[in-house]
Amino acid sequence: MTLQILAFTLILVFVSVVGIAWQRRPPMVRRRCLVTLISDDRHALSGVLWRAHGPWLVFRDCAMTNGQTRTPMSGEVVVDRRNVALVQVDLPHGGEQLR
């Protein structure tokens, strides 16, 4: 009986921790975003926000744009949240979130 109570308590704690972690995930993760930076008001970063880790936002499939030209960037791009002026979230085709 004691073992069952301990197992139930551990499962309850695990589910609670996962739930809290899920709620702390920014809603725009795994979605295409257009990011305006504080340090550069002439260009914007377009890419998929892949993960948010502490003060850092990590983007994939990125390009810098000035509204007329688009310059692709290779690899992951890391941006400090304190340098973000605005994030515009675009829905992928079909309105579904990327998995």
Image (tube, grey):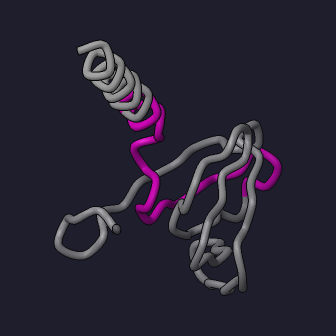
The quarter of the image holding the N terminus is top left
Task: State left or right for residue 16 relative to residue 75.
Answer: left
Q: Is residue 13 magenta?
A: no
Q: Residue lying farthest left?
A: 94
- Give me the residue at 77% from left, 46% from top: 80
- Name the one closer to the observer, 26 or 86: 26
- Give me the residue at 74% from left, 54% from top: 79
Q: Residue lying farthest front?
A: 1
- Give me the residue at 36% from left, 24% from top: 16
- Figure quadrant of residue 66: bottom right
Q: Residue lying farthest right?
A: 39
Task: State left or right for residue 53 relative to residue 13.
Answer: right
Residue 23 x, y percent position in the rendering: 39, 31
- Figure quadrant of residue 42: bottom right
Task: State left or right for residue 72 relative to residue 98.
Answer: right
Residue 41 lies, with reference to residue 50, above or below; the image says: above
- Figure quadrant of residue 14: top left
The quarter of the image holding the C terminus is bottom left
Residue 53 x, y percent position in the rendering: 67, 45
Residue 73 lies, with reference to residue 60, above or below; the image says: below
Residue 37 x, y percent position in the rendering: 71, 51
Q: Is residue 39 magenta?
A: yes
- Name the one closer to the observer, 56 or 11: 11
Residue 36 x, y percent position in the rendering: 63, 53
Residue range highlighted in magenta: 19-41
Task: State left or right for residue 46 relative to residue 97.
Answer: right
